[in-house]
Image (cartoon, rainbow, N blue to C red):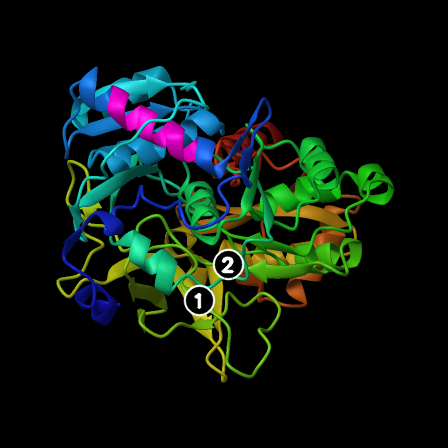
Amino acid sequence: MEQIVQSIKEISPNNNLGDLINLDKDLKKLAIIDEHNKVTYRQLYNMSNYAATILQKEKNIRPGDRVGVKSFNTIGFAAVYLGILKLGAVAVLINPNIPQSQIDIFIKNDNIKFLWIDPILPKDDVVNFDVYPVKNTDPAVILYTSGSTSNYKGVIRPHQHKLYLKYKFNTTIDDKSKLLVSQPLTWAAGIIQLEIALIKHSTLVFLEKFDSKKFLKKISLHKITGANVVPSMLTLILKEKELISTLDLSSLKRISTSSAPISKSLWVSMKEKFPKVHLKNVYGSTEGGPSIFGFHPTLPTPDLSVGYPIDGIDYRIINGILQIRTGSTMLGYTNIDAENLTNDGYFITNDLFFVDENGFYFFLGRADDMFTSGGNNIYPKQIENVLREHPMVKDAAVIGLDDDTKGNKPYAFVVSDTTEKELKEHVLKSFPPSHCPRKIWNIEEIPLNNNYKVDKKILVQKAKSLIEYEGN
């Protein structure tokens, strides 16, 4: 990556992350279709210039100022995002689902000069705007991440991220692709889909918010070729058996999953329902960069693997935890020290990985999910995967609760049609007694948070209440 950076002028408007539309390509082509409107590449280009002009002339925004945009997935969001960057300002992406009290904290602590809410822009006004020349390491965008347990943190991503997308991002997306975006554009996984699609001159279809029925209907209506989702979204999609069997979904060529490990049982279920769709397990992070693994030059990627190392990205595993250094690695956090950045520029992911004999990487789960029970390290994801392998289990989540004797003890929640006794016997075929959940409760569905990840805080509270009620 360093060689790429050195081969391009250090200060150049072409390095500006907002300058993603290639004016030499067909500008009459549809760029984005949202739930209310659609725009061509020419119209989106004009809208982004209009947004930059409004911010500069009416809001007195200058290069380096932080400008927030709060919106669901819309054309206006995309245009304002590009406009903020073209101006040389820093785009602060805010999910509308975040409580207003938390947004007020962002505005104060992160020095947001202006917040643009639910932008609607004219799409046919021709507006010219000179893109601001930036340094590769200038801040471009702030993405908020809460991880799995901590408070929100503002991740500062540089303009150099554009070089990573152009030269290192490993993808089969091209100008014939039609991509369905159902994850919020305020997520790293959402905004990367916008950025890479514009670079590749693809067409994007936006869902304002994820809905499994709408997701499948949009694939059929717009002849979608690809989509990226988190594993919990796949679980919800697979529940729509009638729509899957009746809709024409033949255009769909690939689905990638990210943000959390996918279980073997979910992988198998997807392959059964969508046998002609290429399923890819993707790994990236808000702080470290998107899709940092690719394909082996000759060997096929094993099921569940996130892929093979890409030239130009640095990898190392220390105590089972992956550390990476890419062209998209964050500059740091807003207002707090980035203790997970090493002195030599590696991001400590806190994610546990295994590498097989051929060099393929497998994401095992978060290190901070791990707990100790009687001196044994317990990794919830491994137990969850075994539970899901039982034919009568649709979903599972494992938590650890404090215990005076053992330190912690494992407990589990499942969505299943079988008994606790049978499931414990099933777990004990793969693990020693120390790893077997002390109680396994059957519930109607596993609760998810706003990021479509398992809400383990709710499960901890529920487990404590059940233990008290049952007297265990």
Residue closest to the eye, 448 or 323: 323
Give SS at disc 2: loop
Between residues 203 and 77, which one lies in front from this camera angle?
Answer: 203
Q: Quadrant of the N terminus?
A: bottom left
How many numbered marks appear? 2
* Lower position in the chain sequence, tag 1 or tag 2: 2
Residue 155 magenta-drawn? no
Look at the numbered discs 1 and 2 and tell me whether their residues touch, using CB distance below 8 Å. yes
- At x 19% / y 19%, what residue is drawn? 57
Point 29% across, 62% down: residue: 326
Q: What is the magenta range?
A: 44-54
Residue 423 location, quadrant: bottom right
Question: Which residue corresponds to mark 1?
Answer: 293
Q: Position of residue 189 (x, y in %)?
A: 45, 45
Q: Is residue 453 visible?
A: yes
Cα separation, mark 1 vs mark 2, equals: 7 Å
Closest to the observer, 369 or 265: 265
Residue 464, placed above or below residue 413? above
Which amino acid type corresponds to the residue marked 2 in the rendered image? Answer: Val
Quarter occupied by the C terminus: top right
Q: Measured along the vertical axis of the image, is residue 389 above or below residue 114?
A: below
Report crowding for label 2: few under 14, some 14 to 19, many 20 or more residues within 10 A (C-alpha): many
- Badge 2 is on which residue? 282
